[in-house]
Image (cartoon, grey):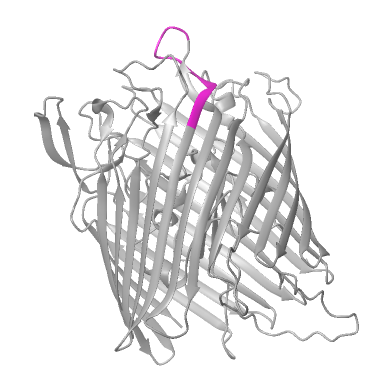
């Protein structure tokens, strides 16, 4: 267990005996994290109307989910409008990668085996971490369930079945087994089948306000069949722990496509096969020295089929491979000063059935030096990340067909500070201030560089710089009606330069090329508040509100400043100025009722902020009611959900209609 602060003990002597005890979780009014973070875990995560990880992340402030609709639709996350590619997604401490297009589809990850979701702006508040964790503008951490065996229990079983609208059938099973006193194993499996058919409204309003058409139809070709299996081993050592995981996901799904030109049904299909094995080992080597080692191997396959010969027959297959190893160490230089050094190696390759494909291979070495200081009311963290990338193309033993980018060597800093302005004689004030600065970048994806007739090997990395200043008031009380209060507010400014966008190639509009001409400035405010209540008659109430204001402006082309286009300085596509959410839950003994509300304000589907590109606000009301059951040693829960209760028709992405009112019924059994 890592201890922080000037009162840290430097460990036991060599002659002391070591006695293993069961893992315990200690909570209290501890010193908060240096870096702004948001977290959903435990009961709060379980009670949300969230089918996938993407559904849960919608309740964080400063986050936009690009959702193409349906159970199997692509779902990606954008933190503070810097772009999907600038958000790192970590699964049990190791990053999920996609070197081909840089996007992680969060719709693939079920909530059934996820115990906690955390969002960090900048980076995580921990210096003992892989160098890769320092390399994103924002980070989302998914932590799966760790086995816990109370008393003499040696086996846990959780079975769940979910059904509902869109022809949904979703059974899952989790089995955990205590192998030895310090080792446990788990196996989780899930199958999802859905027709994906739902009603939607399709209408067009002309500029004079008259209705061109208004009709209701059924979404087609949105079916999905998917299976997920993952197994894990967890172990504890004297002053250390380790875990290993194997993950496999397979799916076949239809791609319903955009509703344009009166085309209501598409025939495109996609097959995904994702496999990885990963492991982590951490140990306190001495009173001052701690180490962490991680490793991963991933193999991802994807097939895309477009059988429609009236457009273009396409049957493309892609295979990605990733090898990743990391070693990090932290040393307590002084009682109030820790330093760390971490080094990662990552190798990515991509193969495809495309004609004249480049077959790229990328080797990356990342080295991070970090320090953390804490004394009384001040806490600070700084890091310097060195990134070294080399790239090769072509099959082994053959010349490169299209050249390669220049090798990259780049150093990027980050500084984070947290301060409590007031302190009493016995305890610290619940009010504290925080700020951070970070400069980072993201590499062009393989598609950006090499996709046939569009890629550009001369692309430079996208650069980002972040400034953040915030305040938090957090208080927990053991007695009284108000059990806890947590209020946070952060103001930020982000700049993205050398942004990679597609521009016309030559004089025609039918050929495009990726170029570094984008520039975006984002000014925003994130506000969130939570209050937990203890009421008479065994009632407890948990409530939370989140709000985000963003002015995300496109400054890519100064010459494009004509009033009729409005592109220069316009709000970038799909980013609302106002959005927020409300969560409220009431619980009494075995009964619970939960309500959630999401609001997304007016947006534009293009940086040209003219009335023709305006998208109307949308909002959803979701309700969940449930009851816990118990029959001897068997525990159960039955719950019912109504999502989009007011049956609003809306698009998150233009011409990709979202479902109207829908429902789910869930039965869970644990023994």
The magenta stretch is: 506-520
Residue at image point 47% right, 80% down:
477
Answer left or right for 98 relative to 666: right
Work out whether residue 62 can be spotted: no
Prevalent SS, magenta region: strand
Farthest left residue in view: 210
In the rendered image, residue 606, in percent from the top left (x then y), is placed at: 35, 28
The answer to whether residue 172 is magenta is: no
Q: Is residue 26 above or below residue 243?
A: below
Answer left or right for 377 relative to 430: right
Q: Nearer the viewer, residue 534 or 110?
A: 534
Farthest top residue in view: 507
In the rendered image, residue 641, in percent from the top left (x then y), is placed at: 27, 66
Answer left or right for 129 relative to 535: right
In the rendered image, residue 75, in percent from the top left (x then y), is placed at: 41, 46
The answer to whether residue 509 is magenta is: yes
Work out whether residue 621 can be spotted: yes
Answer left or right for 567 relative to 515: left
Q: Nearer the viewer, residue 481 or 401?
A: 481
Farthest right residue in view: 15
Q: Quadrant of residue 403?
A: top right
Q: Is residue 513 above or below residue 649?
A: above
Q: Nearer the viewer, residue 61 or 107?
A: 61
Residue at image point 72% right, 43% down:
385
Farthest bottom residue in view: 632
Q: Is residue 400 above or below residue 53?
A: above
Q: How many marks?
A: 0
In the rendered image, residue 335, in percent from the top left (x then y), is placed at: 80, 68
Location of the N terminus by quadrant is bottom right
Residue at image point 75% right, 60% down:
292
């Amino acid at each position: 267990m890592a201890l922080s602060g000037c009162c840290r003990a430097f460990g036991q002597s060599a002659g002391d005996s070591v006695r293993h005890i069961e893992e315990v979780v200690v909570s209290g009014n501890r010193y908060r994290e240096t870096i702004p973070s948001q977290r959903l875990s435990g009961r709060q995560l379980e009670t949300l109307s969230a089918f996938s990880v993407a559904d849960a992340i919608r309740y964080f402030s400063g986050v936009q989910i690009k959702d193409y609709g349906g159970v199997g639709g692509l779902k990606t996350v954008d933190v503070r409008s810097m772009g999907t590619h600038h958000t790192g997604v970590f699964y049990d401490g190791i990053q999920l990668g996609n070197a081909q297009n840089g996007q992680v589809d969060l719709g693939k990850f079920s909530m059934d085996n996820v115990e906690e979701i955390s969002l960090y702006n900048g980076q995580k508040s921990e210096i003992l971490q892989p160098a890769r964790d320092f390399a994103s503008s924002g980070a989302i951490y998914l932590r799966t369930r760790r086995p816990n065996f109370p008393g003499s229990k040696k086996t846990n079983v959780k079975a769940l079945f979910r059904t509902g609208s869109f022809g949904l059938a979703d059974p899952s099973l989790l089995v955990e087994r205590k192998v030895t006193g310090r080792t446990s194993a788990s196996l989780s499996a899930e199958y999802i089948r859905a027709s994906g058919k739902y009603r939607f409204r399709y209408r067009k309003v002309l500029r004079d306000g008259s209705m061109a058409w208004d009709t209701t139809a059924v979404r087609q070709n949105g079916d999905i069949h998917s299976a997920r299996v993952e197994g894990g081993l967890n172990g504890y050592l004297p002053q250390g722990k380790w875990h290993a995981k194997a993950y496999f996901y397979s799916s076949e799904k239809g791609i319903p496509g955009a509703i344009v030109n009166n085309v209501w049904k598409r025939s495109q299909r996609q097959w995904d096969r994702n496999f990885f094995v990963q492991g982590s080992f951490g140990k306190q080597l001495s009173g001052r020295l701690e180490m962490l080692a991680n490793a991963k191997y991933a193999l991802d396959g994807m097939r895309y089929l477009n059988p429609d010969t009236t457009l273009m027959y396409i049957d493309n297959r892609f295979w990605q491979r990733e090898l990743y190893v990391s070693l990090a160490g932290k040393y307590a230089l002084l009682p109030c000063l820790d330093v760390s050094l971490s080094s990662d190696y990552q190798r990515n390759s991509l193969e495809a059935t495309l004609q004249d494909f480049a077959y790229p291979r990328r080797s990356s070495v990342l080295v991070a030096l970090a320090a953390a200081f804490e004394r009384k009311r001040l806490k600070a963290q700084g890091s310097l990340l060195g990134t070294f990338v080399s790239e090769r193309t072509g099959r082994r033993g053959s010349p490169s067909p299209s050249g390669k980018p220049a090798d990259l060597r780049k150093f990027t800093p980050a500084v984070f500070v947290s301060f409590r302005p007031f302190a009493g004689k016995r305890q610290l004030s619940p009010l504290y201030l925080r700020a951070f600065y970070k400069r980072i970048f993201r590499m062009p994806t393989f598609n950006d560089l090499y996709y046939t007739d569009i890629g550009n090997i001369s692309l430079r990395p996208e650069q980002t710089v972040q400034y953040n200043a915030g305040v938090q008031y957090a208080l927990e009380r053991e007695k009284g009606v108000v059990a806890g209060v947590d209020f946070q507010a952060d103001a930020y400014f982000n700049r993205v330069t050398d942004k990679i966008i597609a521009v016309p190639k030559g004089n025609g509009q039918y050929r495009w090329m990726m170029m570094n001409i984008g520039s975006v400035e984002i000014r925003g405010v994130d506000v969130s508040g939570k209050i937990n209540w203890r009421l008479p008659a065994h009632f407890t109430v948990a409530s939370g509100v989140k709000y985000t204001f963003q002015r995300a402006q496109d400054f890519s082309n100064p010459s494009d400043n004509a009033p009729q286009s409005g592109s220069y300085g316009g709000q970038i596509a799909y980013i609302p100025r106002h959005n927020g959410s409300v969560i409220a839950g009431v619980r009494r003994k075995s009964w619970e009722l939960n309500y959630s509300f999401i609001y997304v304000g007016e947006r534009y589907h293009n940086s040209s902020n003219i009335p023709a590109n305006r998208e109307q606000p949308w909002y959803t009301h979701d309700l969940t009611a449930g009851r816990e059951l118990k029959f001897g040693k068997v525990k159960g829960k039955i719950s019912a959900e109504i999502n989009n209760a007011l049956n609003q028709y809306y698009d998150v992405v233009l011409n990709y209609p979202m479902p109207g009112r829908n429902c789910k019924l869930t039965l869970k059994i644990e023994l």
